[in-house]
Image (tube, grey):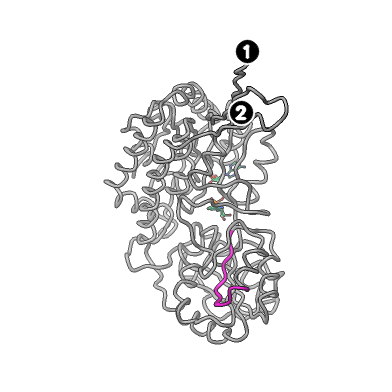
Amino acid sequence: MQKKRLYINGKWIDSQHHSLLLSPYTREEIAEVPRATVEEVEFAIKAAYETRNKMADMPKHQRAKILEQLACKLEQRSEEAARIIALEASKPIKDARIEVARTIQTYKFSSEEAKRINGETISMDAAPGGEGKIAFTTREPLGVIGAITPFNFPMNLVAHKVGPALASGNTIVLKPASQTPLSAYFLAELLHDTDLPAGAFNVVSGSGAVIGDKLVQDERVKKISFTGSPEVGIGIRNKARLKHVTLELGSNSALIVDGNVDVDKIIDRCVTGAFSFQGQVCISLQRIYVHGNVYDLFVERFIKAAKSLRVGDPLDPNTNVSALIHPNEVSRTLDWIKEAEQRGAVLAAGGTRQGNILMPTVLLEVDPSAKVSCQEVFAPVVLINKVSSIEEAIDCVNDSDYGLQAGIYTENIHHAMLASKKLQVGGVLINDIPTYRVDHMPYGGVKDSGVGREGIKYAIQEMTEQKLIIINSMV
Ligand code: NAP
């Protein structure tokens, strides 16, 4: 069994304490992982802090080259990377391979964006008193970024913080999710072999509360970039005082299917959106509102497709759905399904467990107050409710504390435009599911789904400070 070490100041450091990492699928021990103490986190912050000027002064083409080297190394070891994700997260290997391919893209985009961090010129003489003044802005790195990441995309969501941070001349202390630290230590291995200065990237695994509190409260850490659950994210925001904070949080994403849609064309996509990585995706398709004209057909086809999904070992290339991240999550979701049934929902598929796998579950006629509707399920569970108009469907989607992305399938341009205007989310997908992201698009939510945007260019904006320079040409 492998024993991991902390990665601090360009060195592998033995930690005082370790935890056993178990496979979510087999519950077998797969690694011994450092559980960093506050002193060890202090050491990582100090390293990042002392390296900040070196990174800030590094020419952009050099930062770009380091990220290019990283993308290249990951490409060379992509199968190994995918197997790490499958092992520690129980992500089906075909989805893990897609995540690695996207991570390579994220680092390539970061490398390209490093060269495009520009300011603007300001026409000062547009205001009386501005005569003879020339002004322009630059963007300066913040310094040390504290990155806290979730288990569900352990490589690509780490890349969404590490890529833009290094591209914009910051240094980083990364705290990966306790269930998925191996991907982060793998990244450290790759970065160790690039031209990145020691101290610019540090990994400390261990307790979220212990490491998180230290990162959030330390004055030298200028920004927290957090992806995870709303509960933890809101706690961080409350403690962060004037620190910059980006929060990428959860959702109960919804889709509208209009009455004029060819159901057979969209079923496979909807099933993928609902059950990919066992529904443990922040934009997983959780609620579907279907117009009465096509409701019965949609439900029949959807259930048939859901029942045909292959469940099993994440390392089997034919597996579609594997174990949830922890057995407690299976029990919690089964309780939520029971609660929905008690409130009148009809269980149309699934609702049972096979070991640590929850069978793909479809619920019909779900009351909006049921947890599977109004909270984030984060499991392979989807509800399908009937609606009689586009206005009713939009109201149902908006009846949520969350607002990450939403989708609408329709042949009617007026309905598409109404939905794009009225849906209270960070991104509207017309004729697609909400479970869609490419890595350079602006991505983030409204309401309890978070604050700020990721997508390399947008994350760079949030990891840099604007500075204004005014030249008086009349002296
Ligand atoms: P989580 O429990 O909130 O954990 C996220 C990270 O926060 C982990 O590294 C965790 O460490 C750490 N943490 C826990 N307690 C903390 C504290 N008190 N202070 C600071 N950090 C703390 O979330 P998760 O279960 O890993 O991920 C699932 C959630 O992430 C879902 O809600 C999902 O929707 C959301 N998500 C959002 C996006 C997006 O882009 N909007 C993308 C992916 C996931 P430990 O693991 O050690 O507890």
Task: Name the residue at 65% across, 63% down.
Answer: 421
* Amino acid at the residue labelled 2: Asp
* Amino acid at the residue labelled 1: Val
Tell me the quarter of the image containing the C terminus: top right
Q: Label 1: which residue?
A: 475
Q: Which element type, helix, strand or loop, lies under badge 1?
A: loop
Give the image quarter of residue 426: bottom right
From what the image shows, is residue 28 above or below residue 124? Answer: below
Q: Nearer the viewer, mark 2 or mark 1?
A: 1
Q: Which element type, helix, strand or loop, lies under badge 2?
A: loop
Going by the image, does 25 lie left or right of 74?
right
The magenta stretch is 405-414
Task: Name the residue at 55% across, 40% down.
Answer: 207
From what the image shows, is residue 208 above or below residue 350? Answer: above
Q: Nearer the viewer, residue 104 or 175?
A: 104
Q: Label 2: which residue?
A: 218
Tell me the quarter of the image containing the N terminus: top left
Label 2 near ligand 1 (CB < 8 Å): no
Q: Nearer the viewer, residue 286 or 353?
A: 286
Q: Residue furthest left?
A: 76
Spot occupied by residue 190 in the image (x, y as percentages of width and height): 33, 38
Task: Name the residue at 30% across, 50% down.
Answer: 78
CA gap between label 2 and label 1 equals: 44 Å
Earlier in the chain: of badge 2 and badge 1, it is 2
